[in-house]
Image (spheres, rainbow, N blue to C red):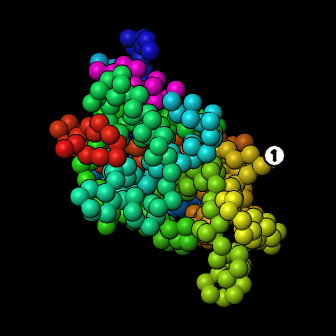
Amino acid sequence: MLRHPAWGAICLLAVILILCAASLCTHAGRSTSSYHLLDDEEEEDDGGDDSASFSFSSPRATPDELAFGFYDGTCPDAEGIVASTVRELFIADSNVAAALVRLFFHDCFVHGCDASVLLDRINGGKSERDAAPNRSLRGFGAIDKIKARLEKKCPETVSCADILALAARDSLVLVGGPSYPVLTGRRDSARSFHDDVNVPSPNATHAMTLDAFARRGFTERETVALLGAHSIGKVQCRFFRDRIYNFAGTGQPDDSLDADMIGEMRAVCGGAGTAPMEMGYYRQGREVGFGAHYYAKLLAGRGILRSDQQLTAGSTVRWVRVYASGVRGEEAFREDFAHAMVKLSALAPLTGSAGQVRVSCSRPLE
């Protein structure tokens, strides 16, 4: 891929602008697109906390350790190979997009974006893939295919962590999500962290979800924006069956669910066949795709997962309302989501001499 000499500077400026919309700049302010969608009462209730402004700092690292065009001199076609392979996989099976985004999230939530989630068992010890929240993860084969093509073109050069970060972004674009800048230069972890896997549960309460994200440095606003990724993909019935039959041991469905939604969920999950029973946040025409329709569904009591519906149960409902407020809300959501993904992508990367560049994404170097 040919690049204009000024491309690197333009991309760097783009990220600087994104980060300066956040609190990494000394005098950060709100994103105006969503700020003006809040009514006066909600603005007063804000109390000046940072849930309404972005904070791109991370617990262990900053994006400054990564770079644009990291592979320009060693593997100039790297990002193009990732993008073209993801597109090829998406054409064959559109479900791969949601799988890769989820895989990336689960990786970054445990010791940062270091591809540790991709490792198989090492010397008999359990890997992150064995942890309960990760047993339903998919997309490993897609990453392996991308890695194989990169190894053929540029052996021992492009890290699995960077592949995962780029593939997640490219997947989101393919399902109608916003594009955002991805810095590269991550290296791969040599070990997995089975005992440290602690991602928010599908049945998490409002408080539990906020706490899990806050411990990774995310604000309330960023948390609500990131959960908008649930607008793509499908949820297996086993993750929400209790909500429609015996919620919290009551013998009744979850009373936060819309009555018609309960019927729809039971229709999908009541079968006894071998076909996968799953649901998504469908738009018109039953198309699964990225968008703020997810938040409108929550306001209507049509959240599939309890953790989703819980976003309307506390202070986070103000951001749900903002994102569900028509065209302007959609614009605000896309902007906020892009900012939050840049921040997620920068969580505790291994750079420089730390970590390694695996030849196989499922096995550390000998």
Q: Quadrant of residue 236?
A: bottom right
Residue 189 visible somewhere in the drawing: yes
- Residue 338, percent from left and from top: 52, 41
Q: Is residue 110 left or right of residue 219?
A: left
The answer to whether residue 97 is left or right of residue 69 is: right
Q: Main secondary structure of the magenta part?
A: helix
Instruction: Identify whether 64 is placed above or below 251.
Output: above
Q: Nearer the viewer, residue 281 or 267?
A: 267
Nearest to the observer: residue 163 or residue 275: 275
Q: Quadrant of residue 266?
A: bottom right
Extreme residue toward the bottom, this view: 250
In-image side of 333 versus 199 (left or right) = right
Q: Quadrant of the C terminus?
A: top left
Position of residue 89 relative to residue 193, above or below, is: above
| Along the line of sight, the residue nearer the viewer: 302 or 189 | 189
Image coordinates for residue 210, horizontal then vertical, percent: 48, 65
Tell me which segment is drawn in magenta.
Answer: 74-84
| Element type at mark 1 | helix
- Residue sticking out furthest to the front: 274
Visible residue check, residue 312: no
* Residue carrying label 1: 285
Side (left or right) of 187 relative to 97? left
Residue at 32% across, 23% down: 154
Looking at the picture, which amino acid does disc 1 mark?
Answer: Gly
Q: Quadrant of the N terminus?
A: top left
Residue plotted at (33% across, 51% down):
119
Which residue is at 62% across, 59% downward? 235
Q: What percent of the width, then of the height, locates residue 334?
A: 60, 42
What residue appears at the point 51 percent right and 59 percent down from the top-left corner? 136
How many marks can you see? Answer: 1
Where is residue 337? Give x, y as percent. Answer: 54, 45
Residue 32, located in which quarter of the rendered image?
Answer: top right
